[in-house]
Amino acid sequence: MNILFVHNNFPAQYRYLVRALLREADMALAAVASPSARSIKGVRLVKYAMPGTDVSATHPFARRFDLECRRAEQVLYSLTSLMASGLPIRGGARRCR
């Protein structure tokens, strides 16, 4: 089974879940995260870049939204890279809280 984690601060709250999944047979784990994420042996980690962005021209109420849209764009590029390298990524993603 292939499992992909998308979390800016990977492994964060998924640390114990990841360790448990790594003990299972036939598990392929990958993660997309920010440059500050920590790697875990056995998990393919792709870190996206967050280029410095001047949001001073953006309305103050929309600055956070602007930054998160830019983050989402970088995640998309990382996912495209993973797919190109052979990791199958399909729909059916679940958001966990």
Image: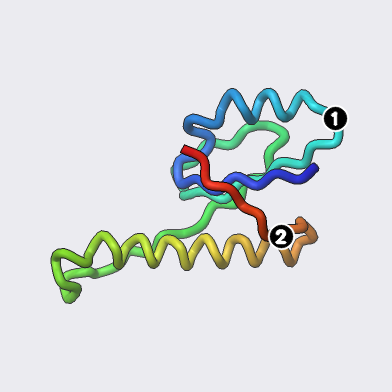
Snapshot quadrant of residue 64: bottom left
Locate residue 55, reporting x and y percent: 22, 69
Snapshot quadrant of residue 52: bottom left
Residue bearing the label numbered 2? 90
Find residue 70 and name its label. none
Q: Is residue 36 left or right of residue 87?
A: left
Snapshot quadrant of residue 91: bottom right
Q: How far is mark 1 from mark 2, CA to CA? A: 21 Å
Q: Is residue 18 left or right of residue 37?
A: right
Task: Tell me the SS state at disc 1.
Answer: loop
Residue sitting at the far right: 26
Locate residue 43, reporting x and y percent: 68, 39
Locate residue 25, reporting x and y percent: 85, 30
User: Which one is in front, 81 or 23?
Assistant: 23
Locate residue 59, reporting x and y percent: 15, 72
Residue bearing the label numbered 1? 25
User: Which one is in front, 54 or 95?
Assistant: 95
